[in-house]
């Protein structure tokens, strides 16, 4: 499935959604379509064109067979999205929270507009299929 950021952003516009960073992050992390991720988050209470609480994002993944494990050691080493790109391995799928934003990292690549930027990381979670 082609889940790169630009494709998912085009899908978001096609579905009339904005402020949908959590939908894109869930779609990348779970390797599902934008619409599927949007439905998963709607089950948690997310409304279109609105921000998404962290709990909704985590619960949407957990309810569909994923586990999330916080990586505090990596959080200490990687303070920004730019440094995270240098530190991560290619075999990990991560959910990364910054202030009022969430992004996904998969295959060693940041799937978000914050790629290469100095946005300060608050939490990093390892996403694994159970």
Image: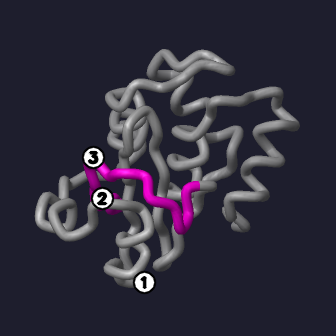
Q: How is the image coloured?
A: one colour
Of 62 and 47, which appears nearest the observer? 47
Instruction: Residue 12 in the image: state x and y as whole percent.
Output: 76, 39
Q: CA distance from mark 2 to mark 3?
A: 25 Å
Task: Judge the density around disc 1: few (<14), some (14-19), many (≥20) Cα neighbours within 10 Å.
Answer: few
Q: CA distance from mark 3 to mark 1?
A: 21 Å
Instruction: Label 1, secondary structure: give it.
Output: loop
**Numbered mark located on residue 90 in the image:** 1
Tell me which segment is drawn in magenta: 114-130
Q: Residue at x 27, y 46 (%)?
A: 122
Of 40 and 124, which appears nearest the observer? 124
| Mark closer to the chain start, 3 or 1 | 1
The residue that mark 2 highlights is 130
**Numbered mark located on residue 8 in the image:** none
Instruction: Residue 98 in the image: state x and y as whole percent.
Output: 38, 44
Magenta run includes residue 112? no
Disc 2, disc 3: CB below 8 Å? no
Magenta run includes residue 119? yes
Q: Quadrant of the C terminus?
A: bottom left
The residue that mark 3 highlights is 122
Instruction: Residue 25 in the image: state x and y as whole percent.
Output: 52, 49
Q: Residue at the front extreme?
A: 118
Does 98 appear above or below 87? above
């Amino acid at each position: 499935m082609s889940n790169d950021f630009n494709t998912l952003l085009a899908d978001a516009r096609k579905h009339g959604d904005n402020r949908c960073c959590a939908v894109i992050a869930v779609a990348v992390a779970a390797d599902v379509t934008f619409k599927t991720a949007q439905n998963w988050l709607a089950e948690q209470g997310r409304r279109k064109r609105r921000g998404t609480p962290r709990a909704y994002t985590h619960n949407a993944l957990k309810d569909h067979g994923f586990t999330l494990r916080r990586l505090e050691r990596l959080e200490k080493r990687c303070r920004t999205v730019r440094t995270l790109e240098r530190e991560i391995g290619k075999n990990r799928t991560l959910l990364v929270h910054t202030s009022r934003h969430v992004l996904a990292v998969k295959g060693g690549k940041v799937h978000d507009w914050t790629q290469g930027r100095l946005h300060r990381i608050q939490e990093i979670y390892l996403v694994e299929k159970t």
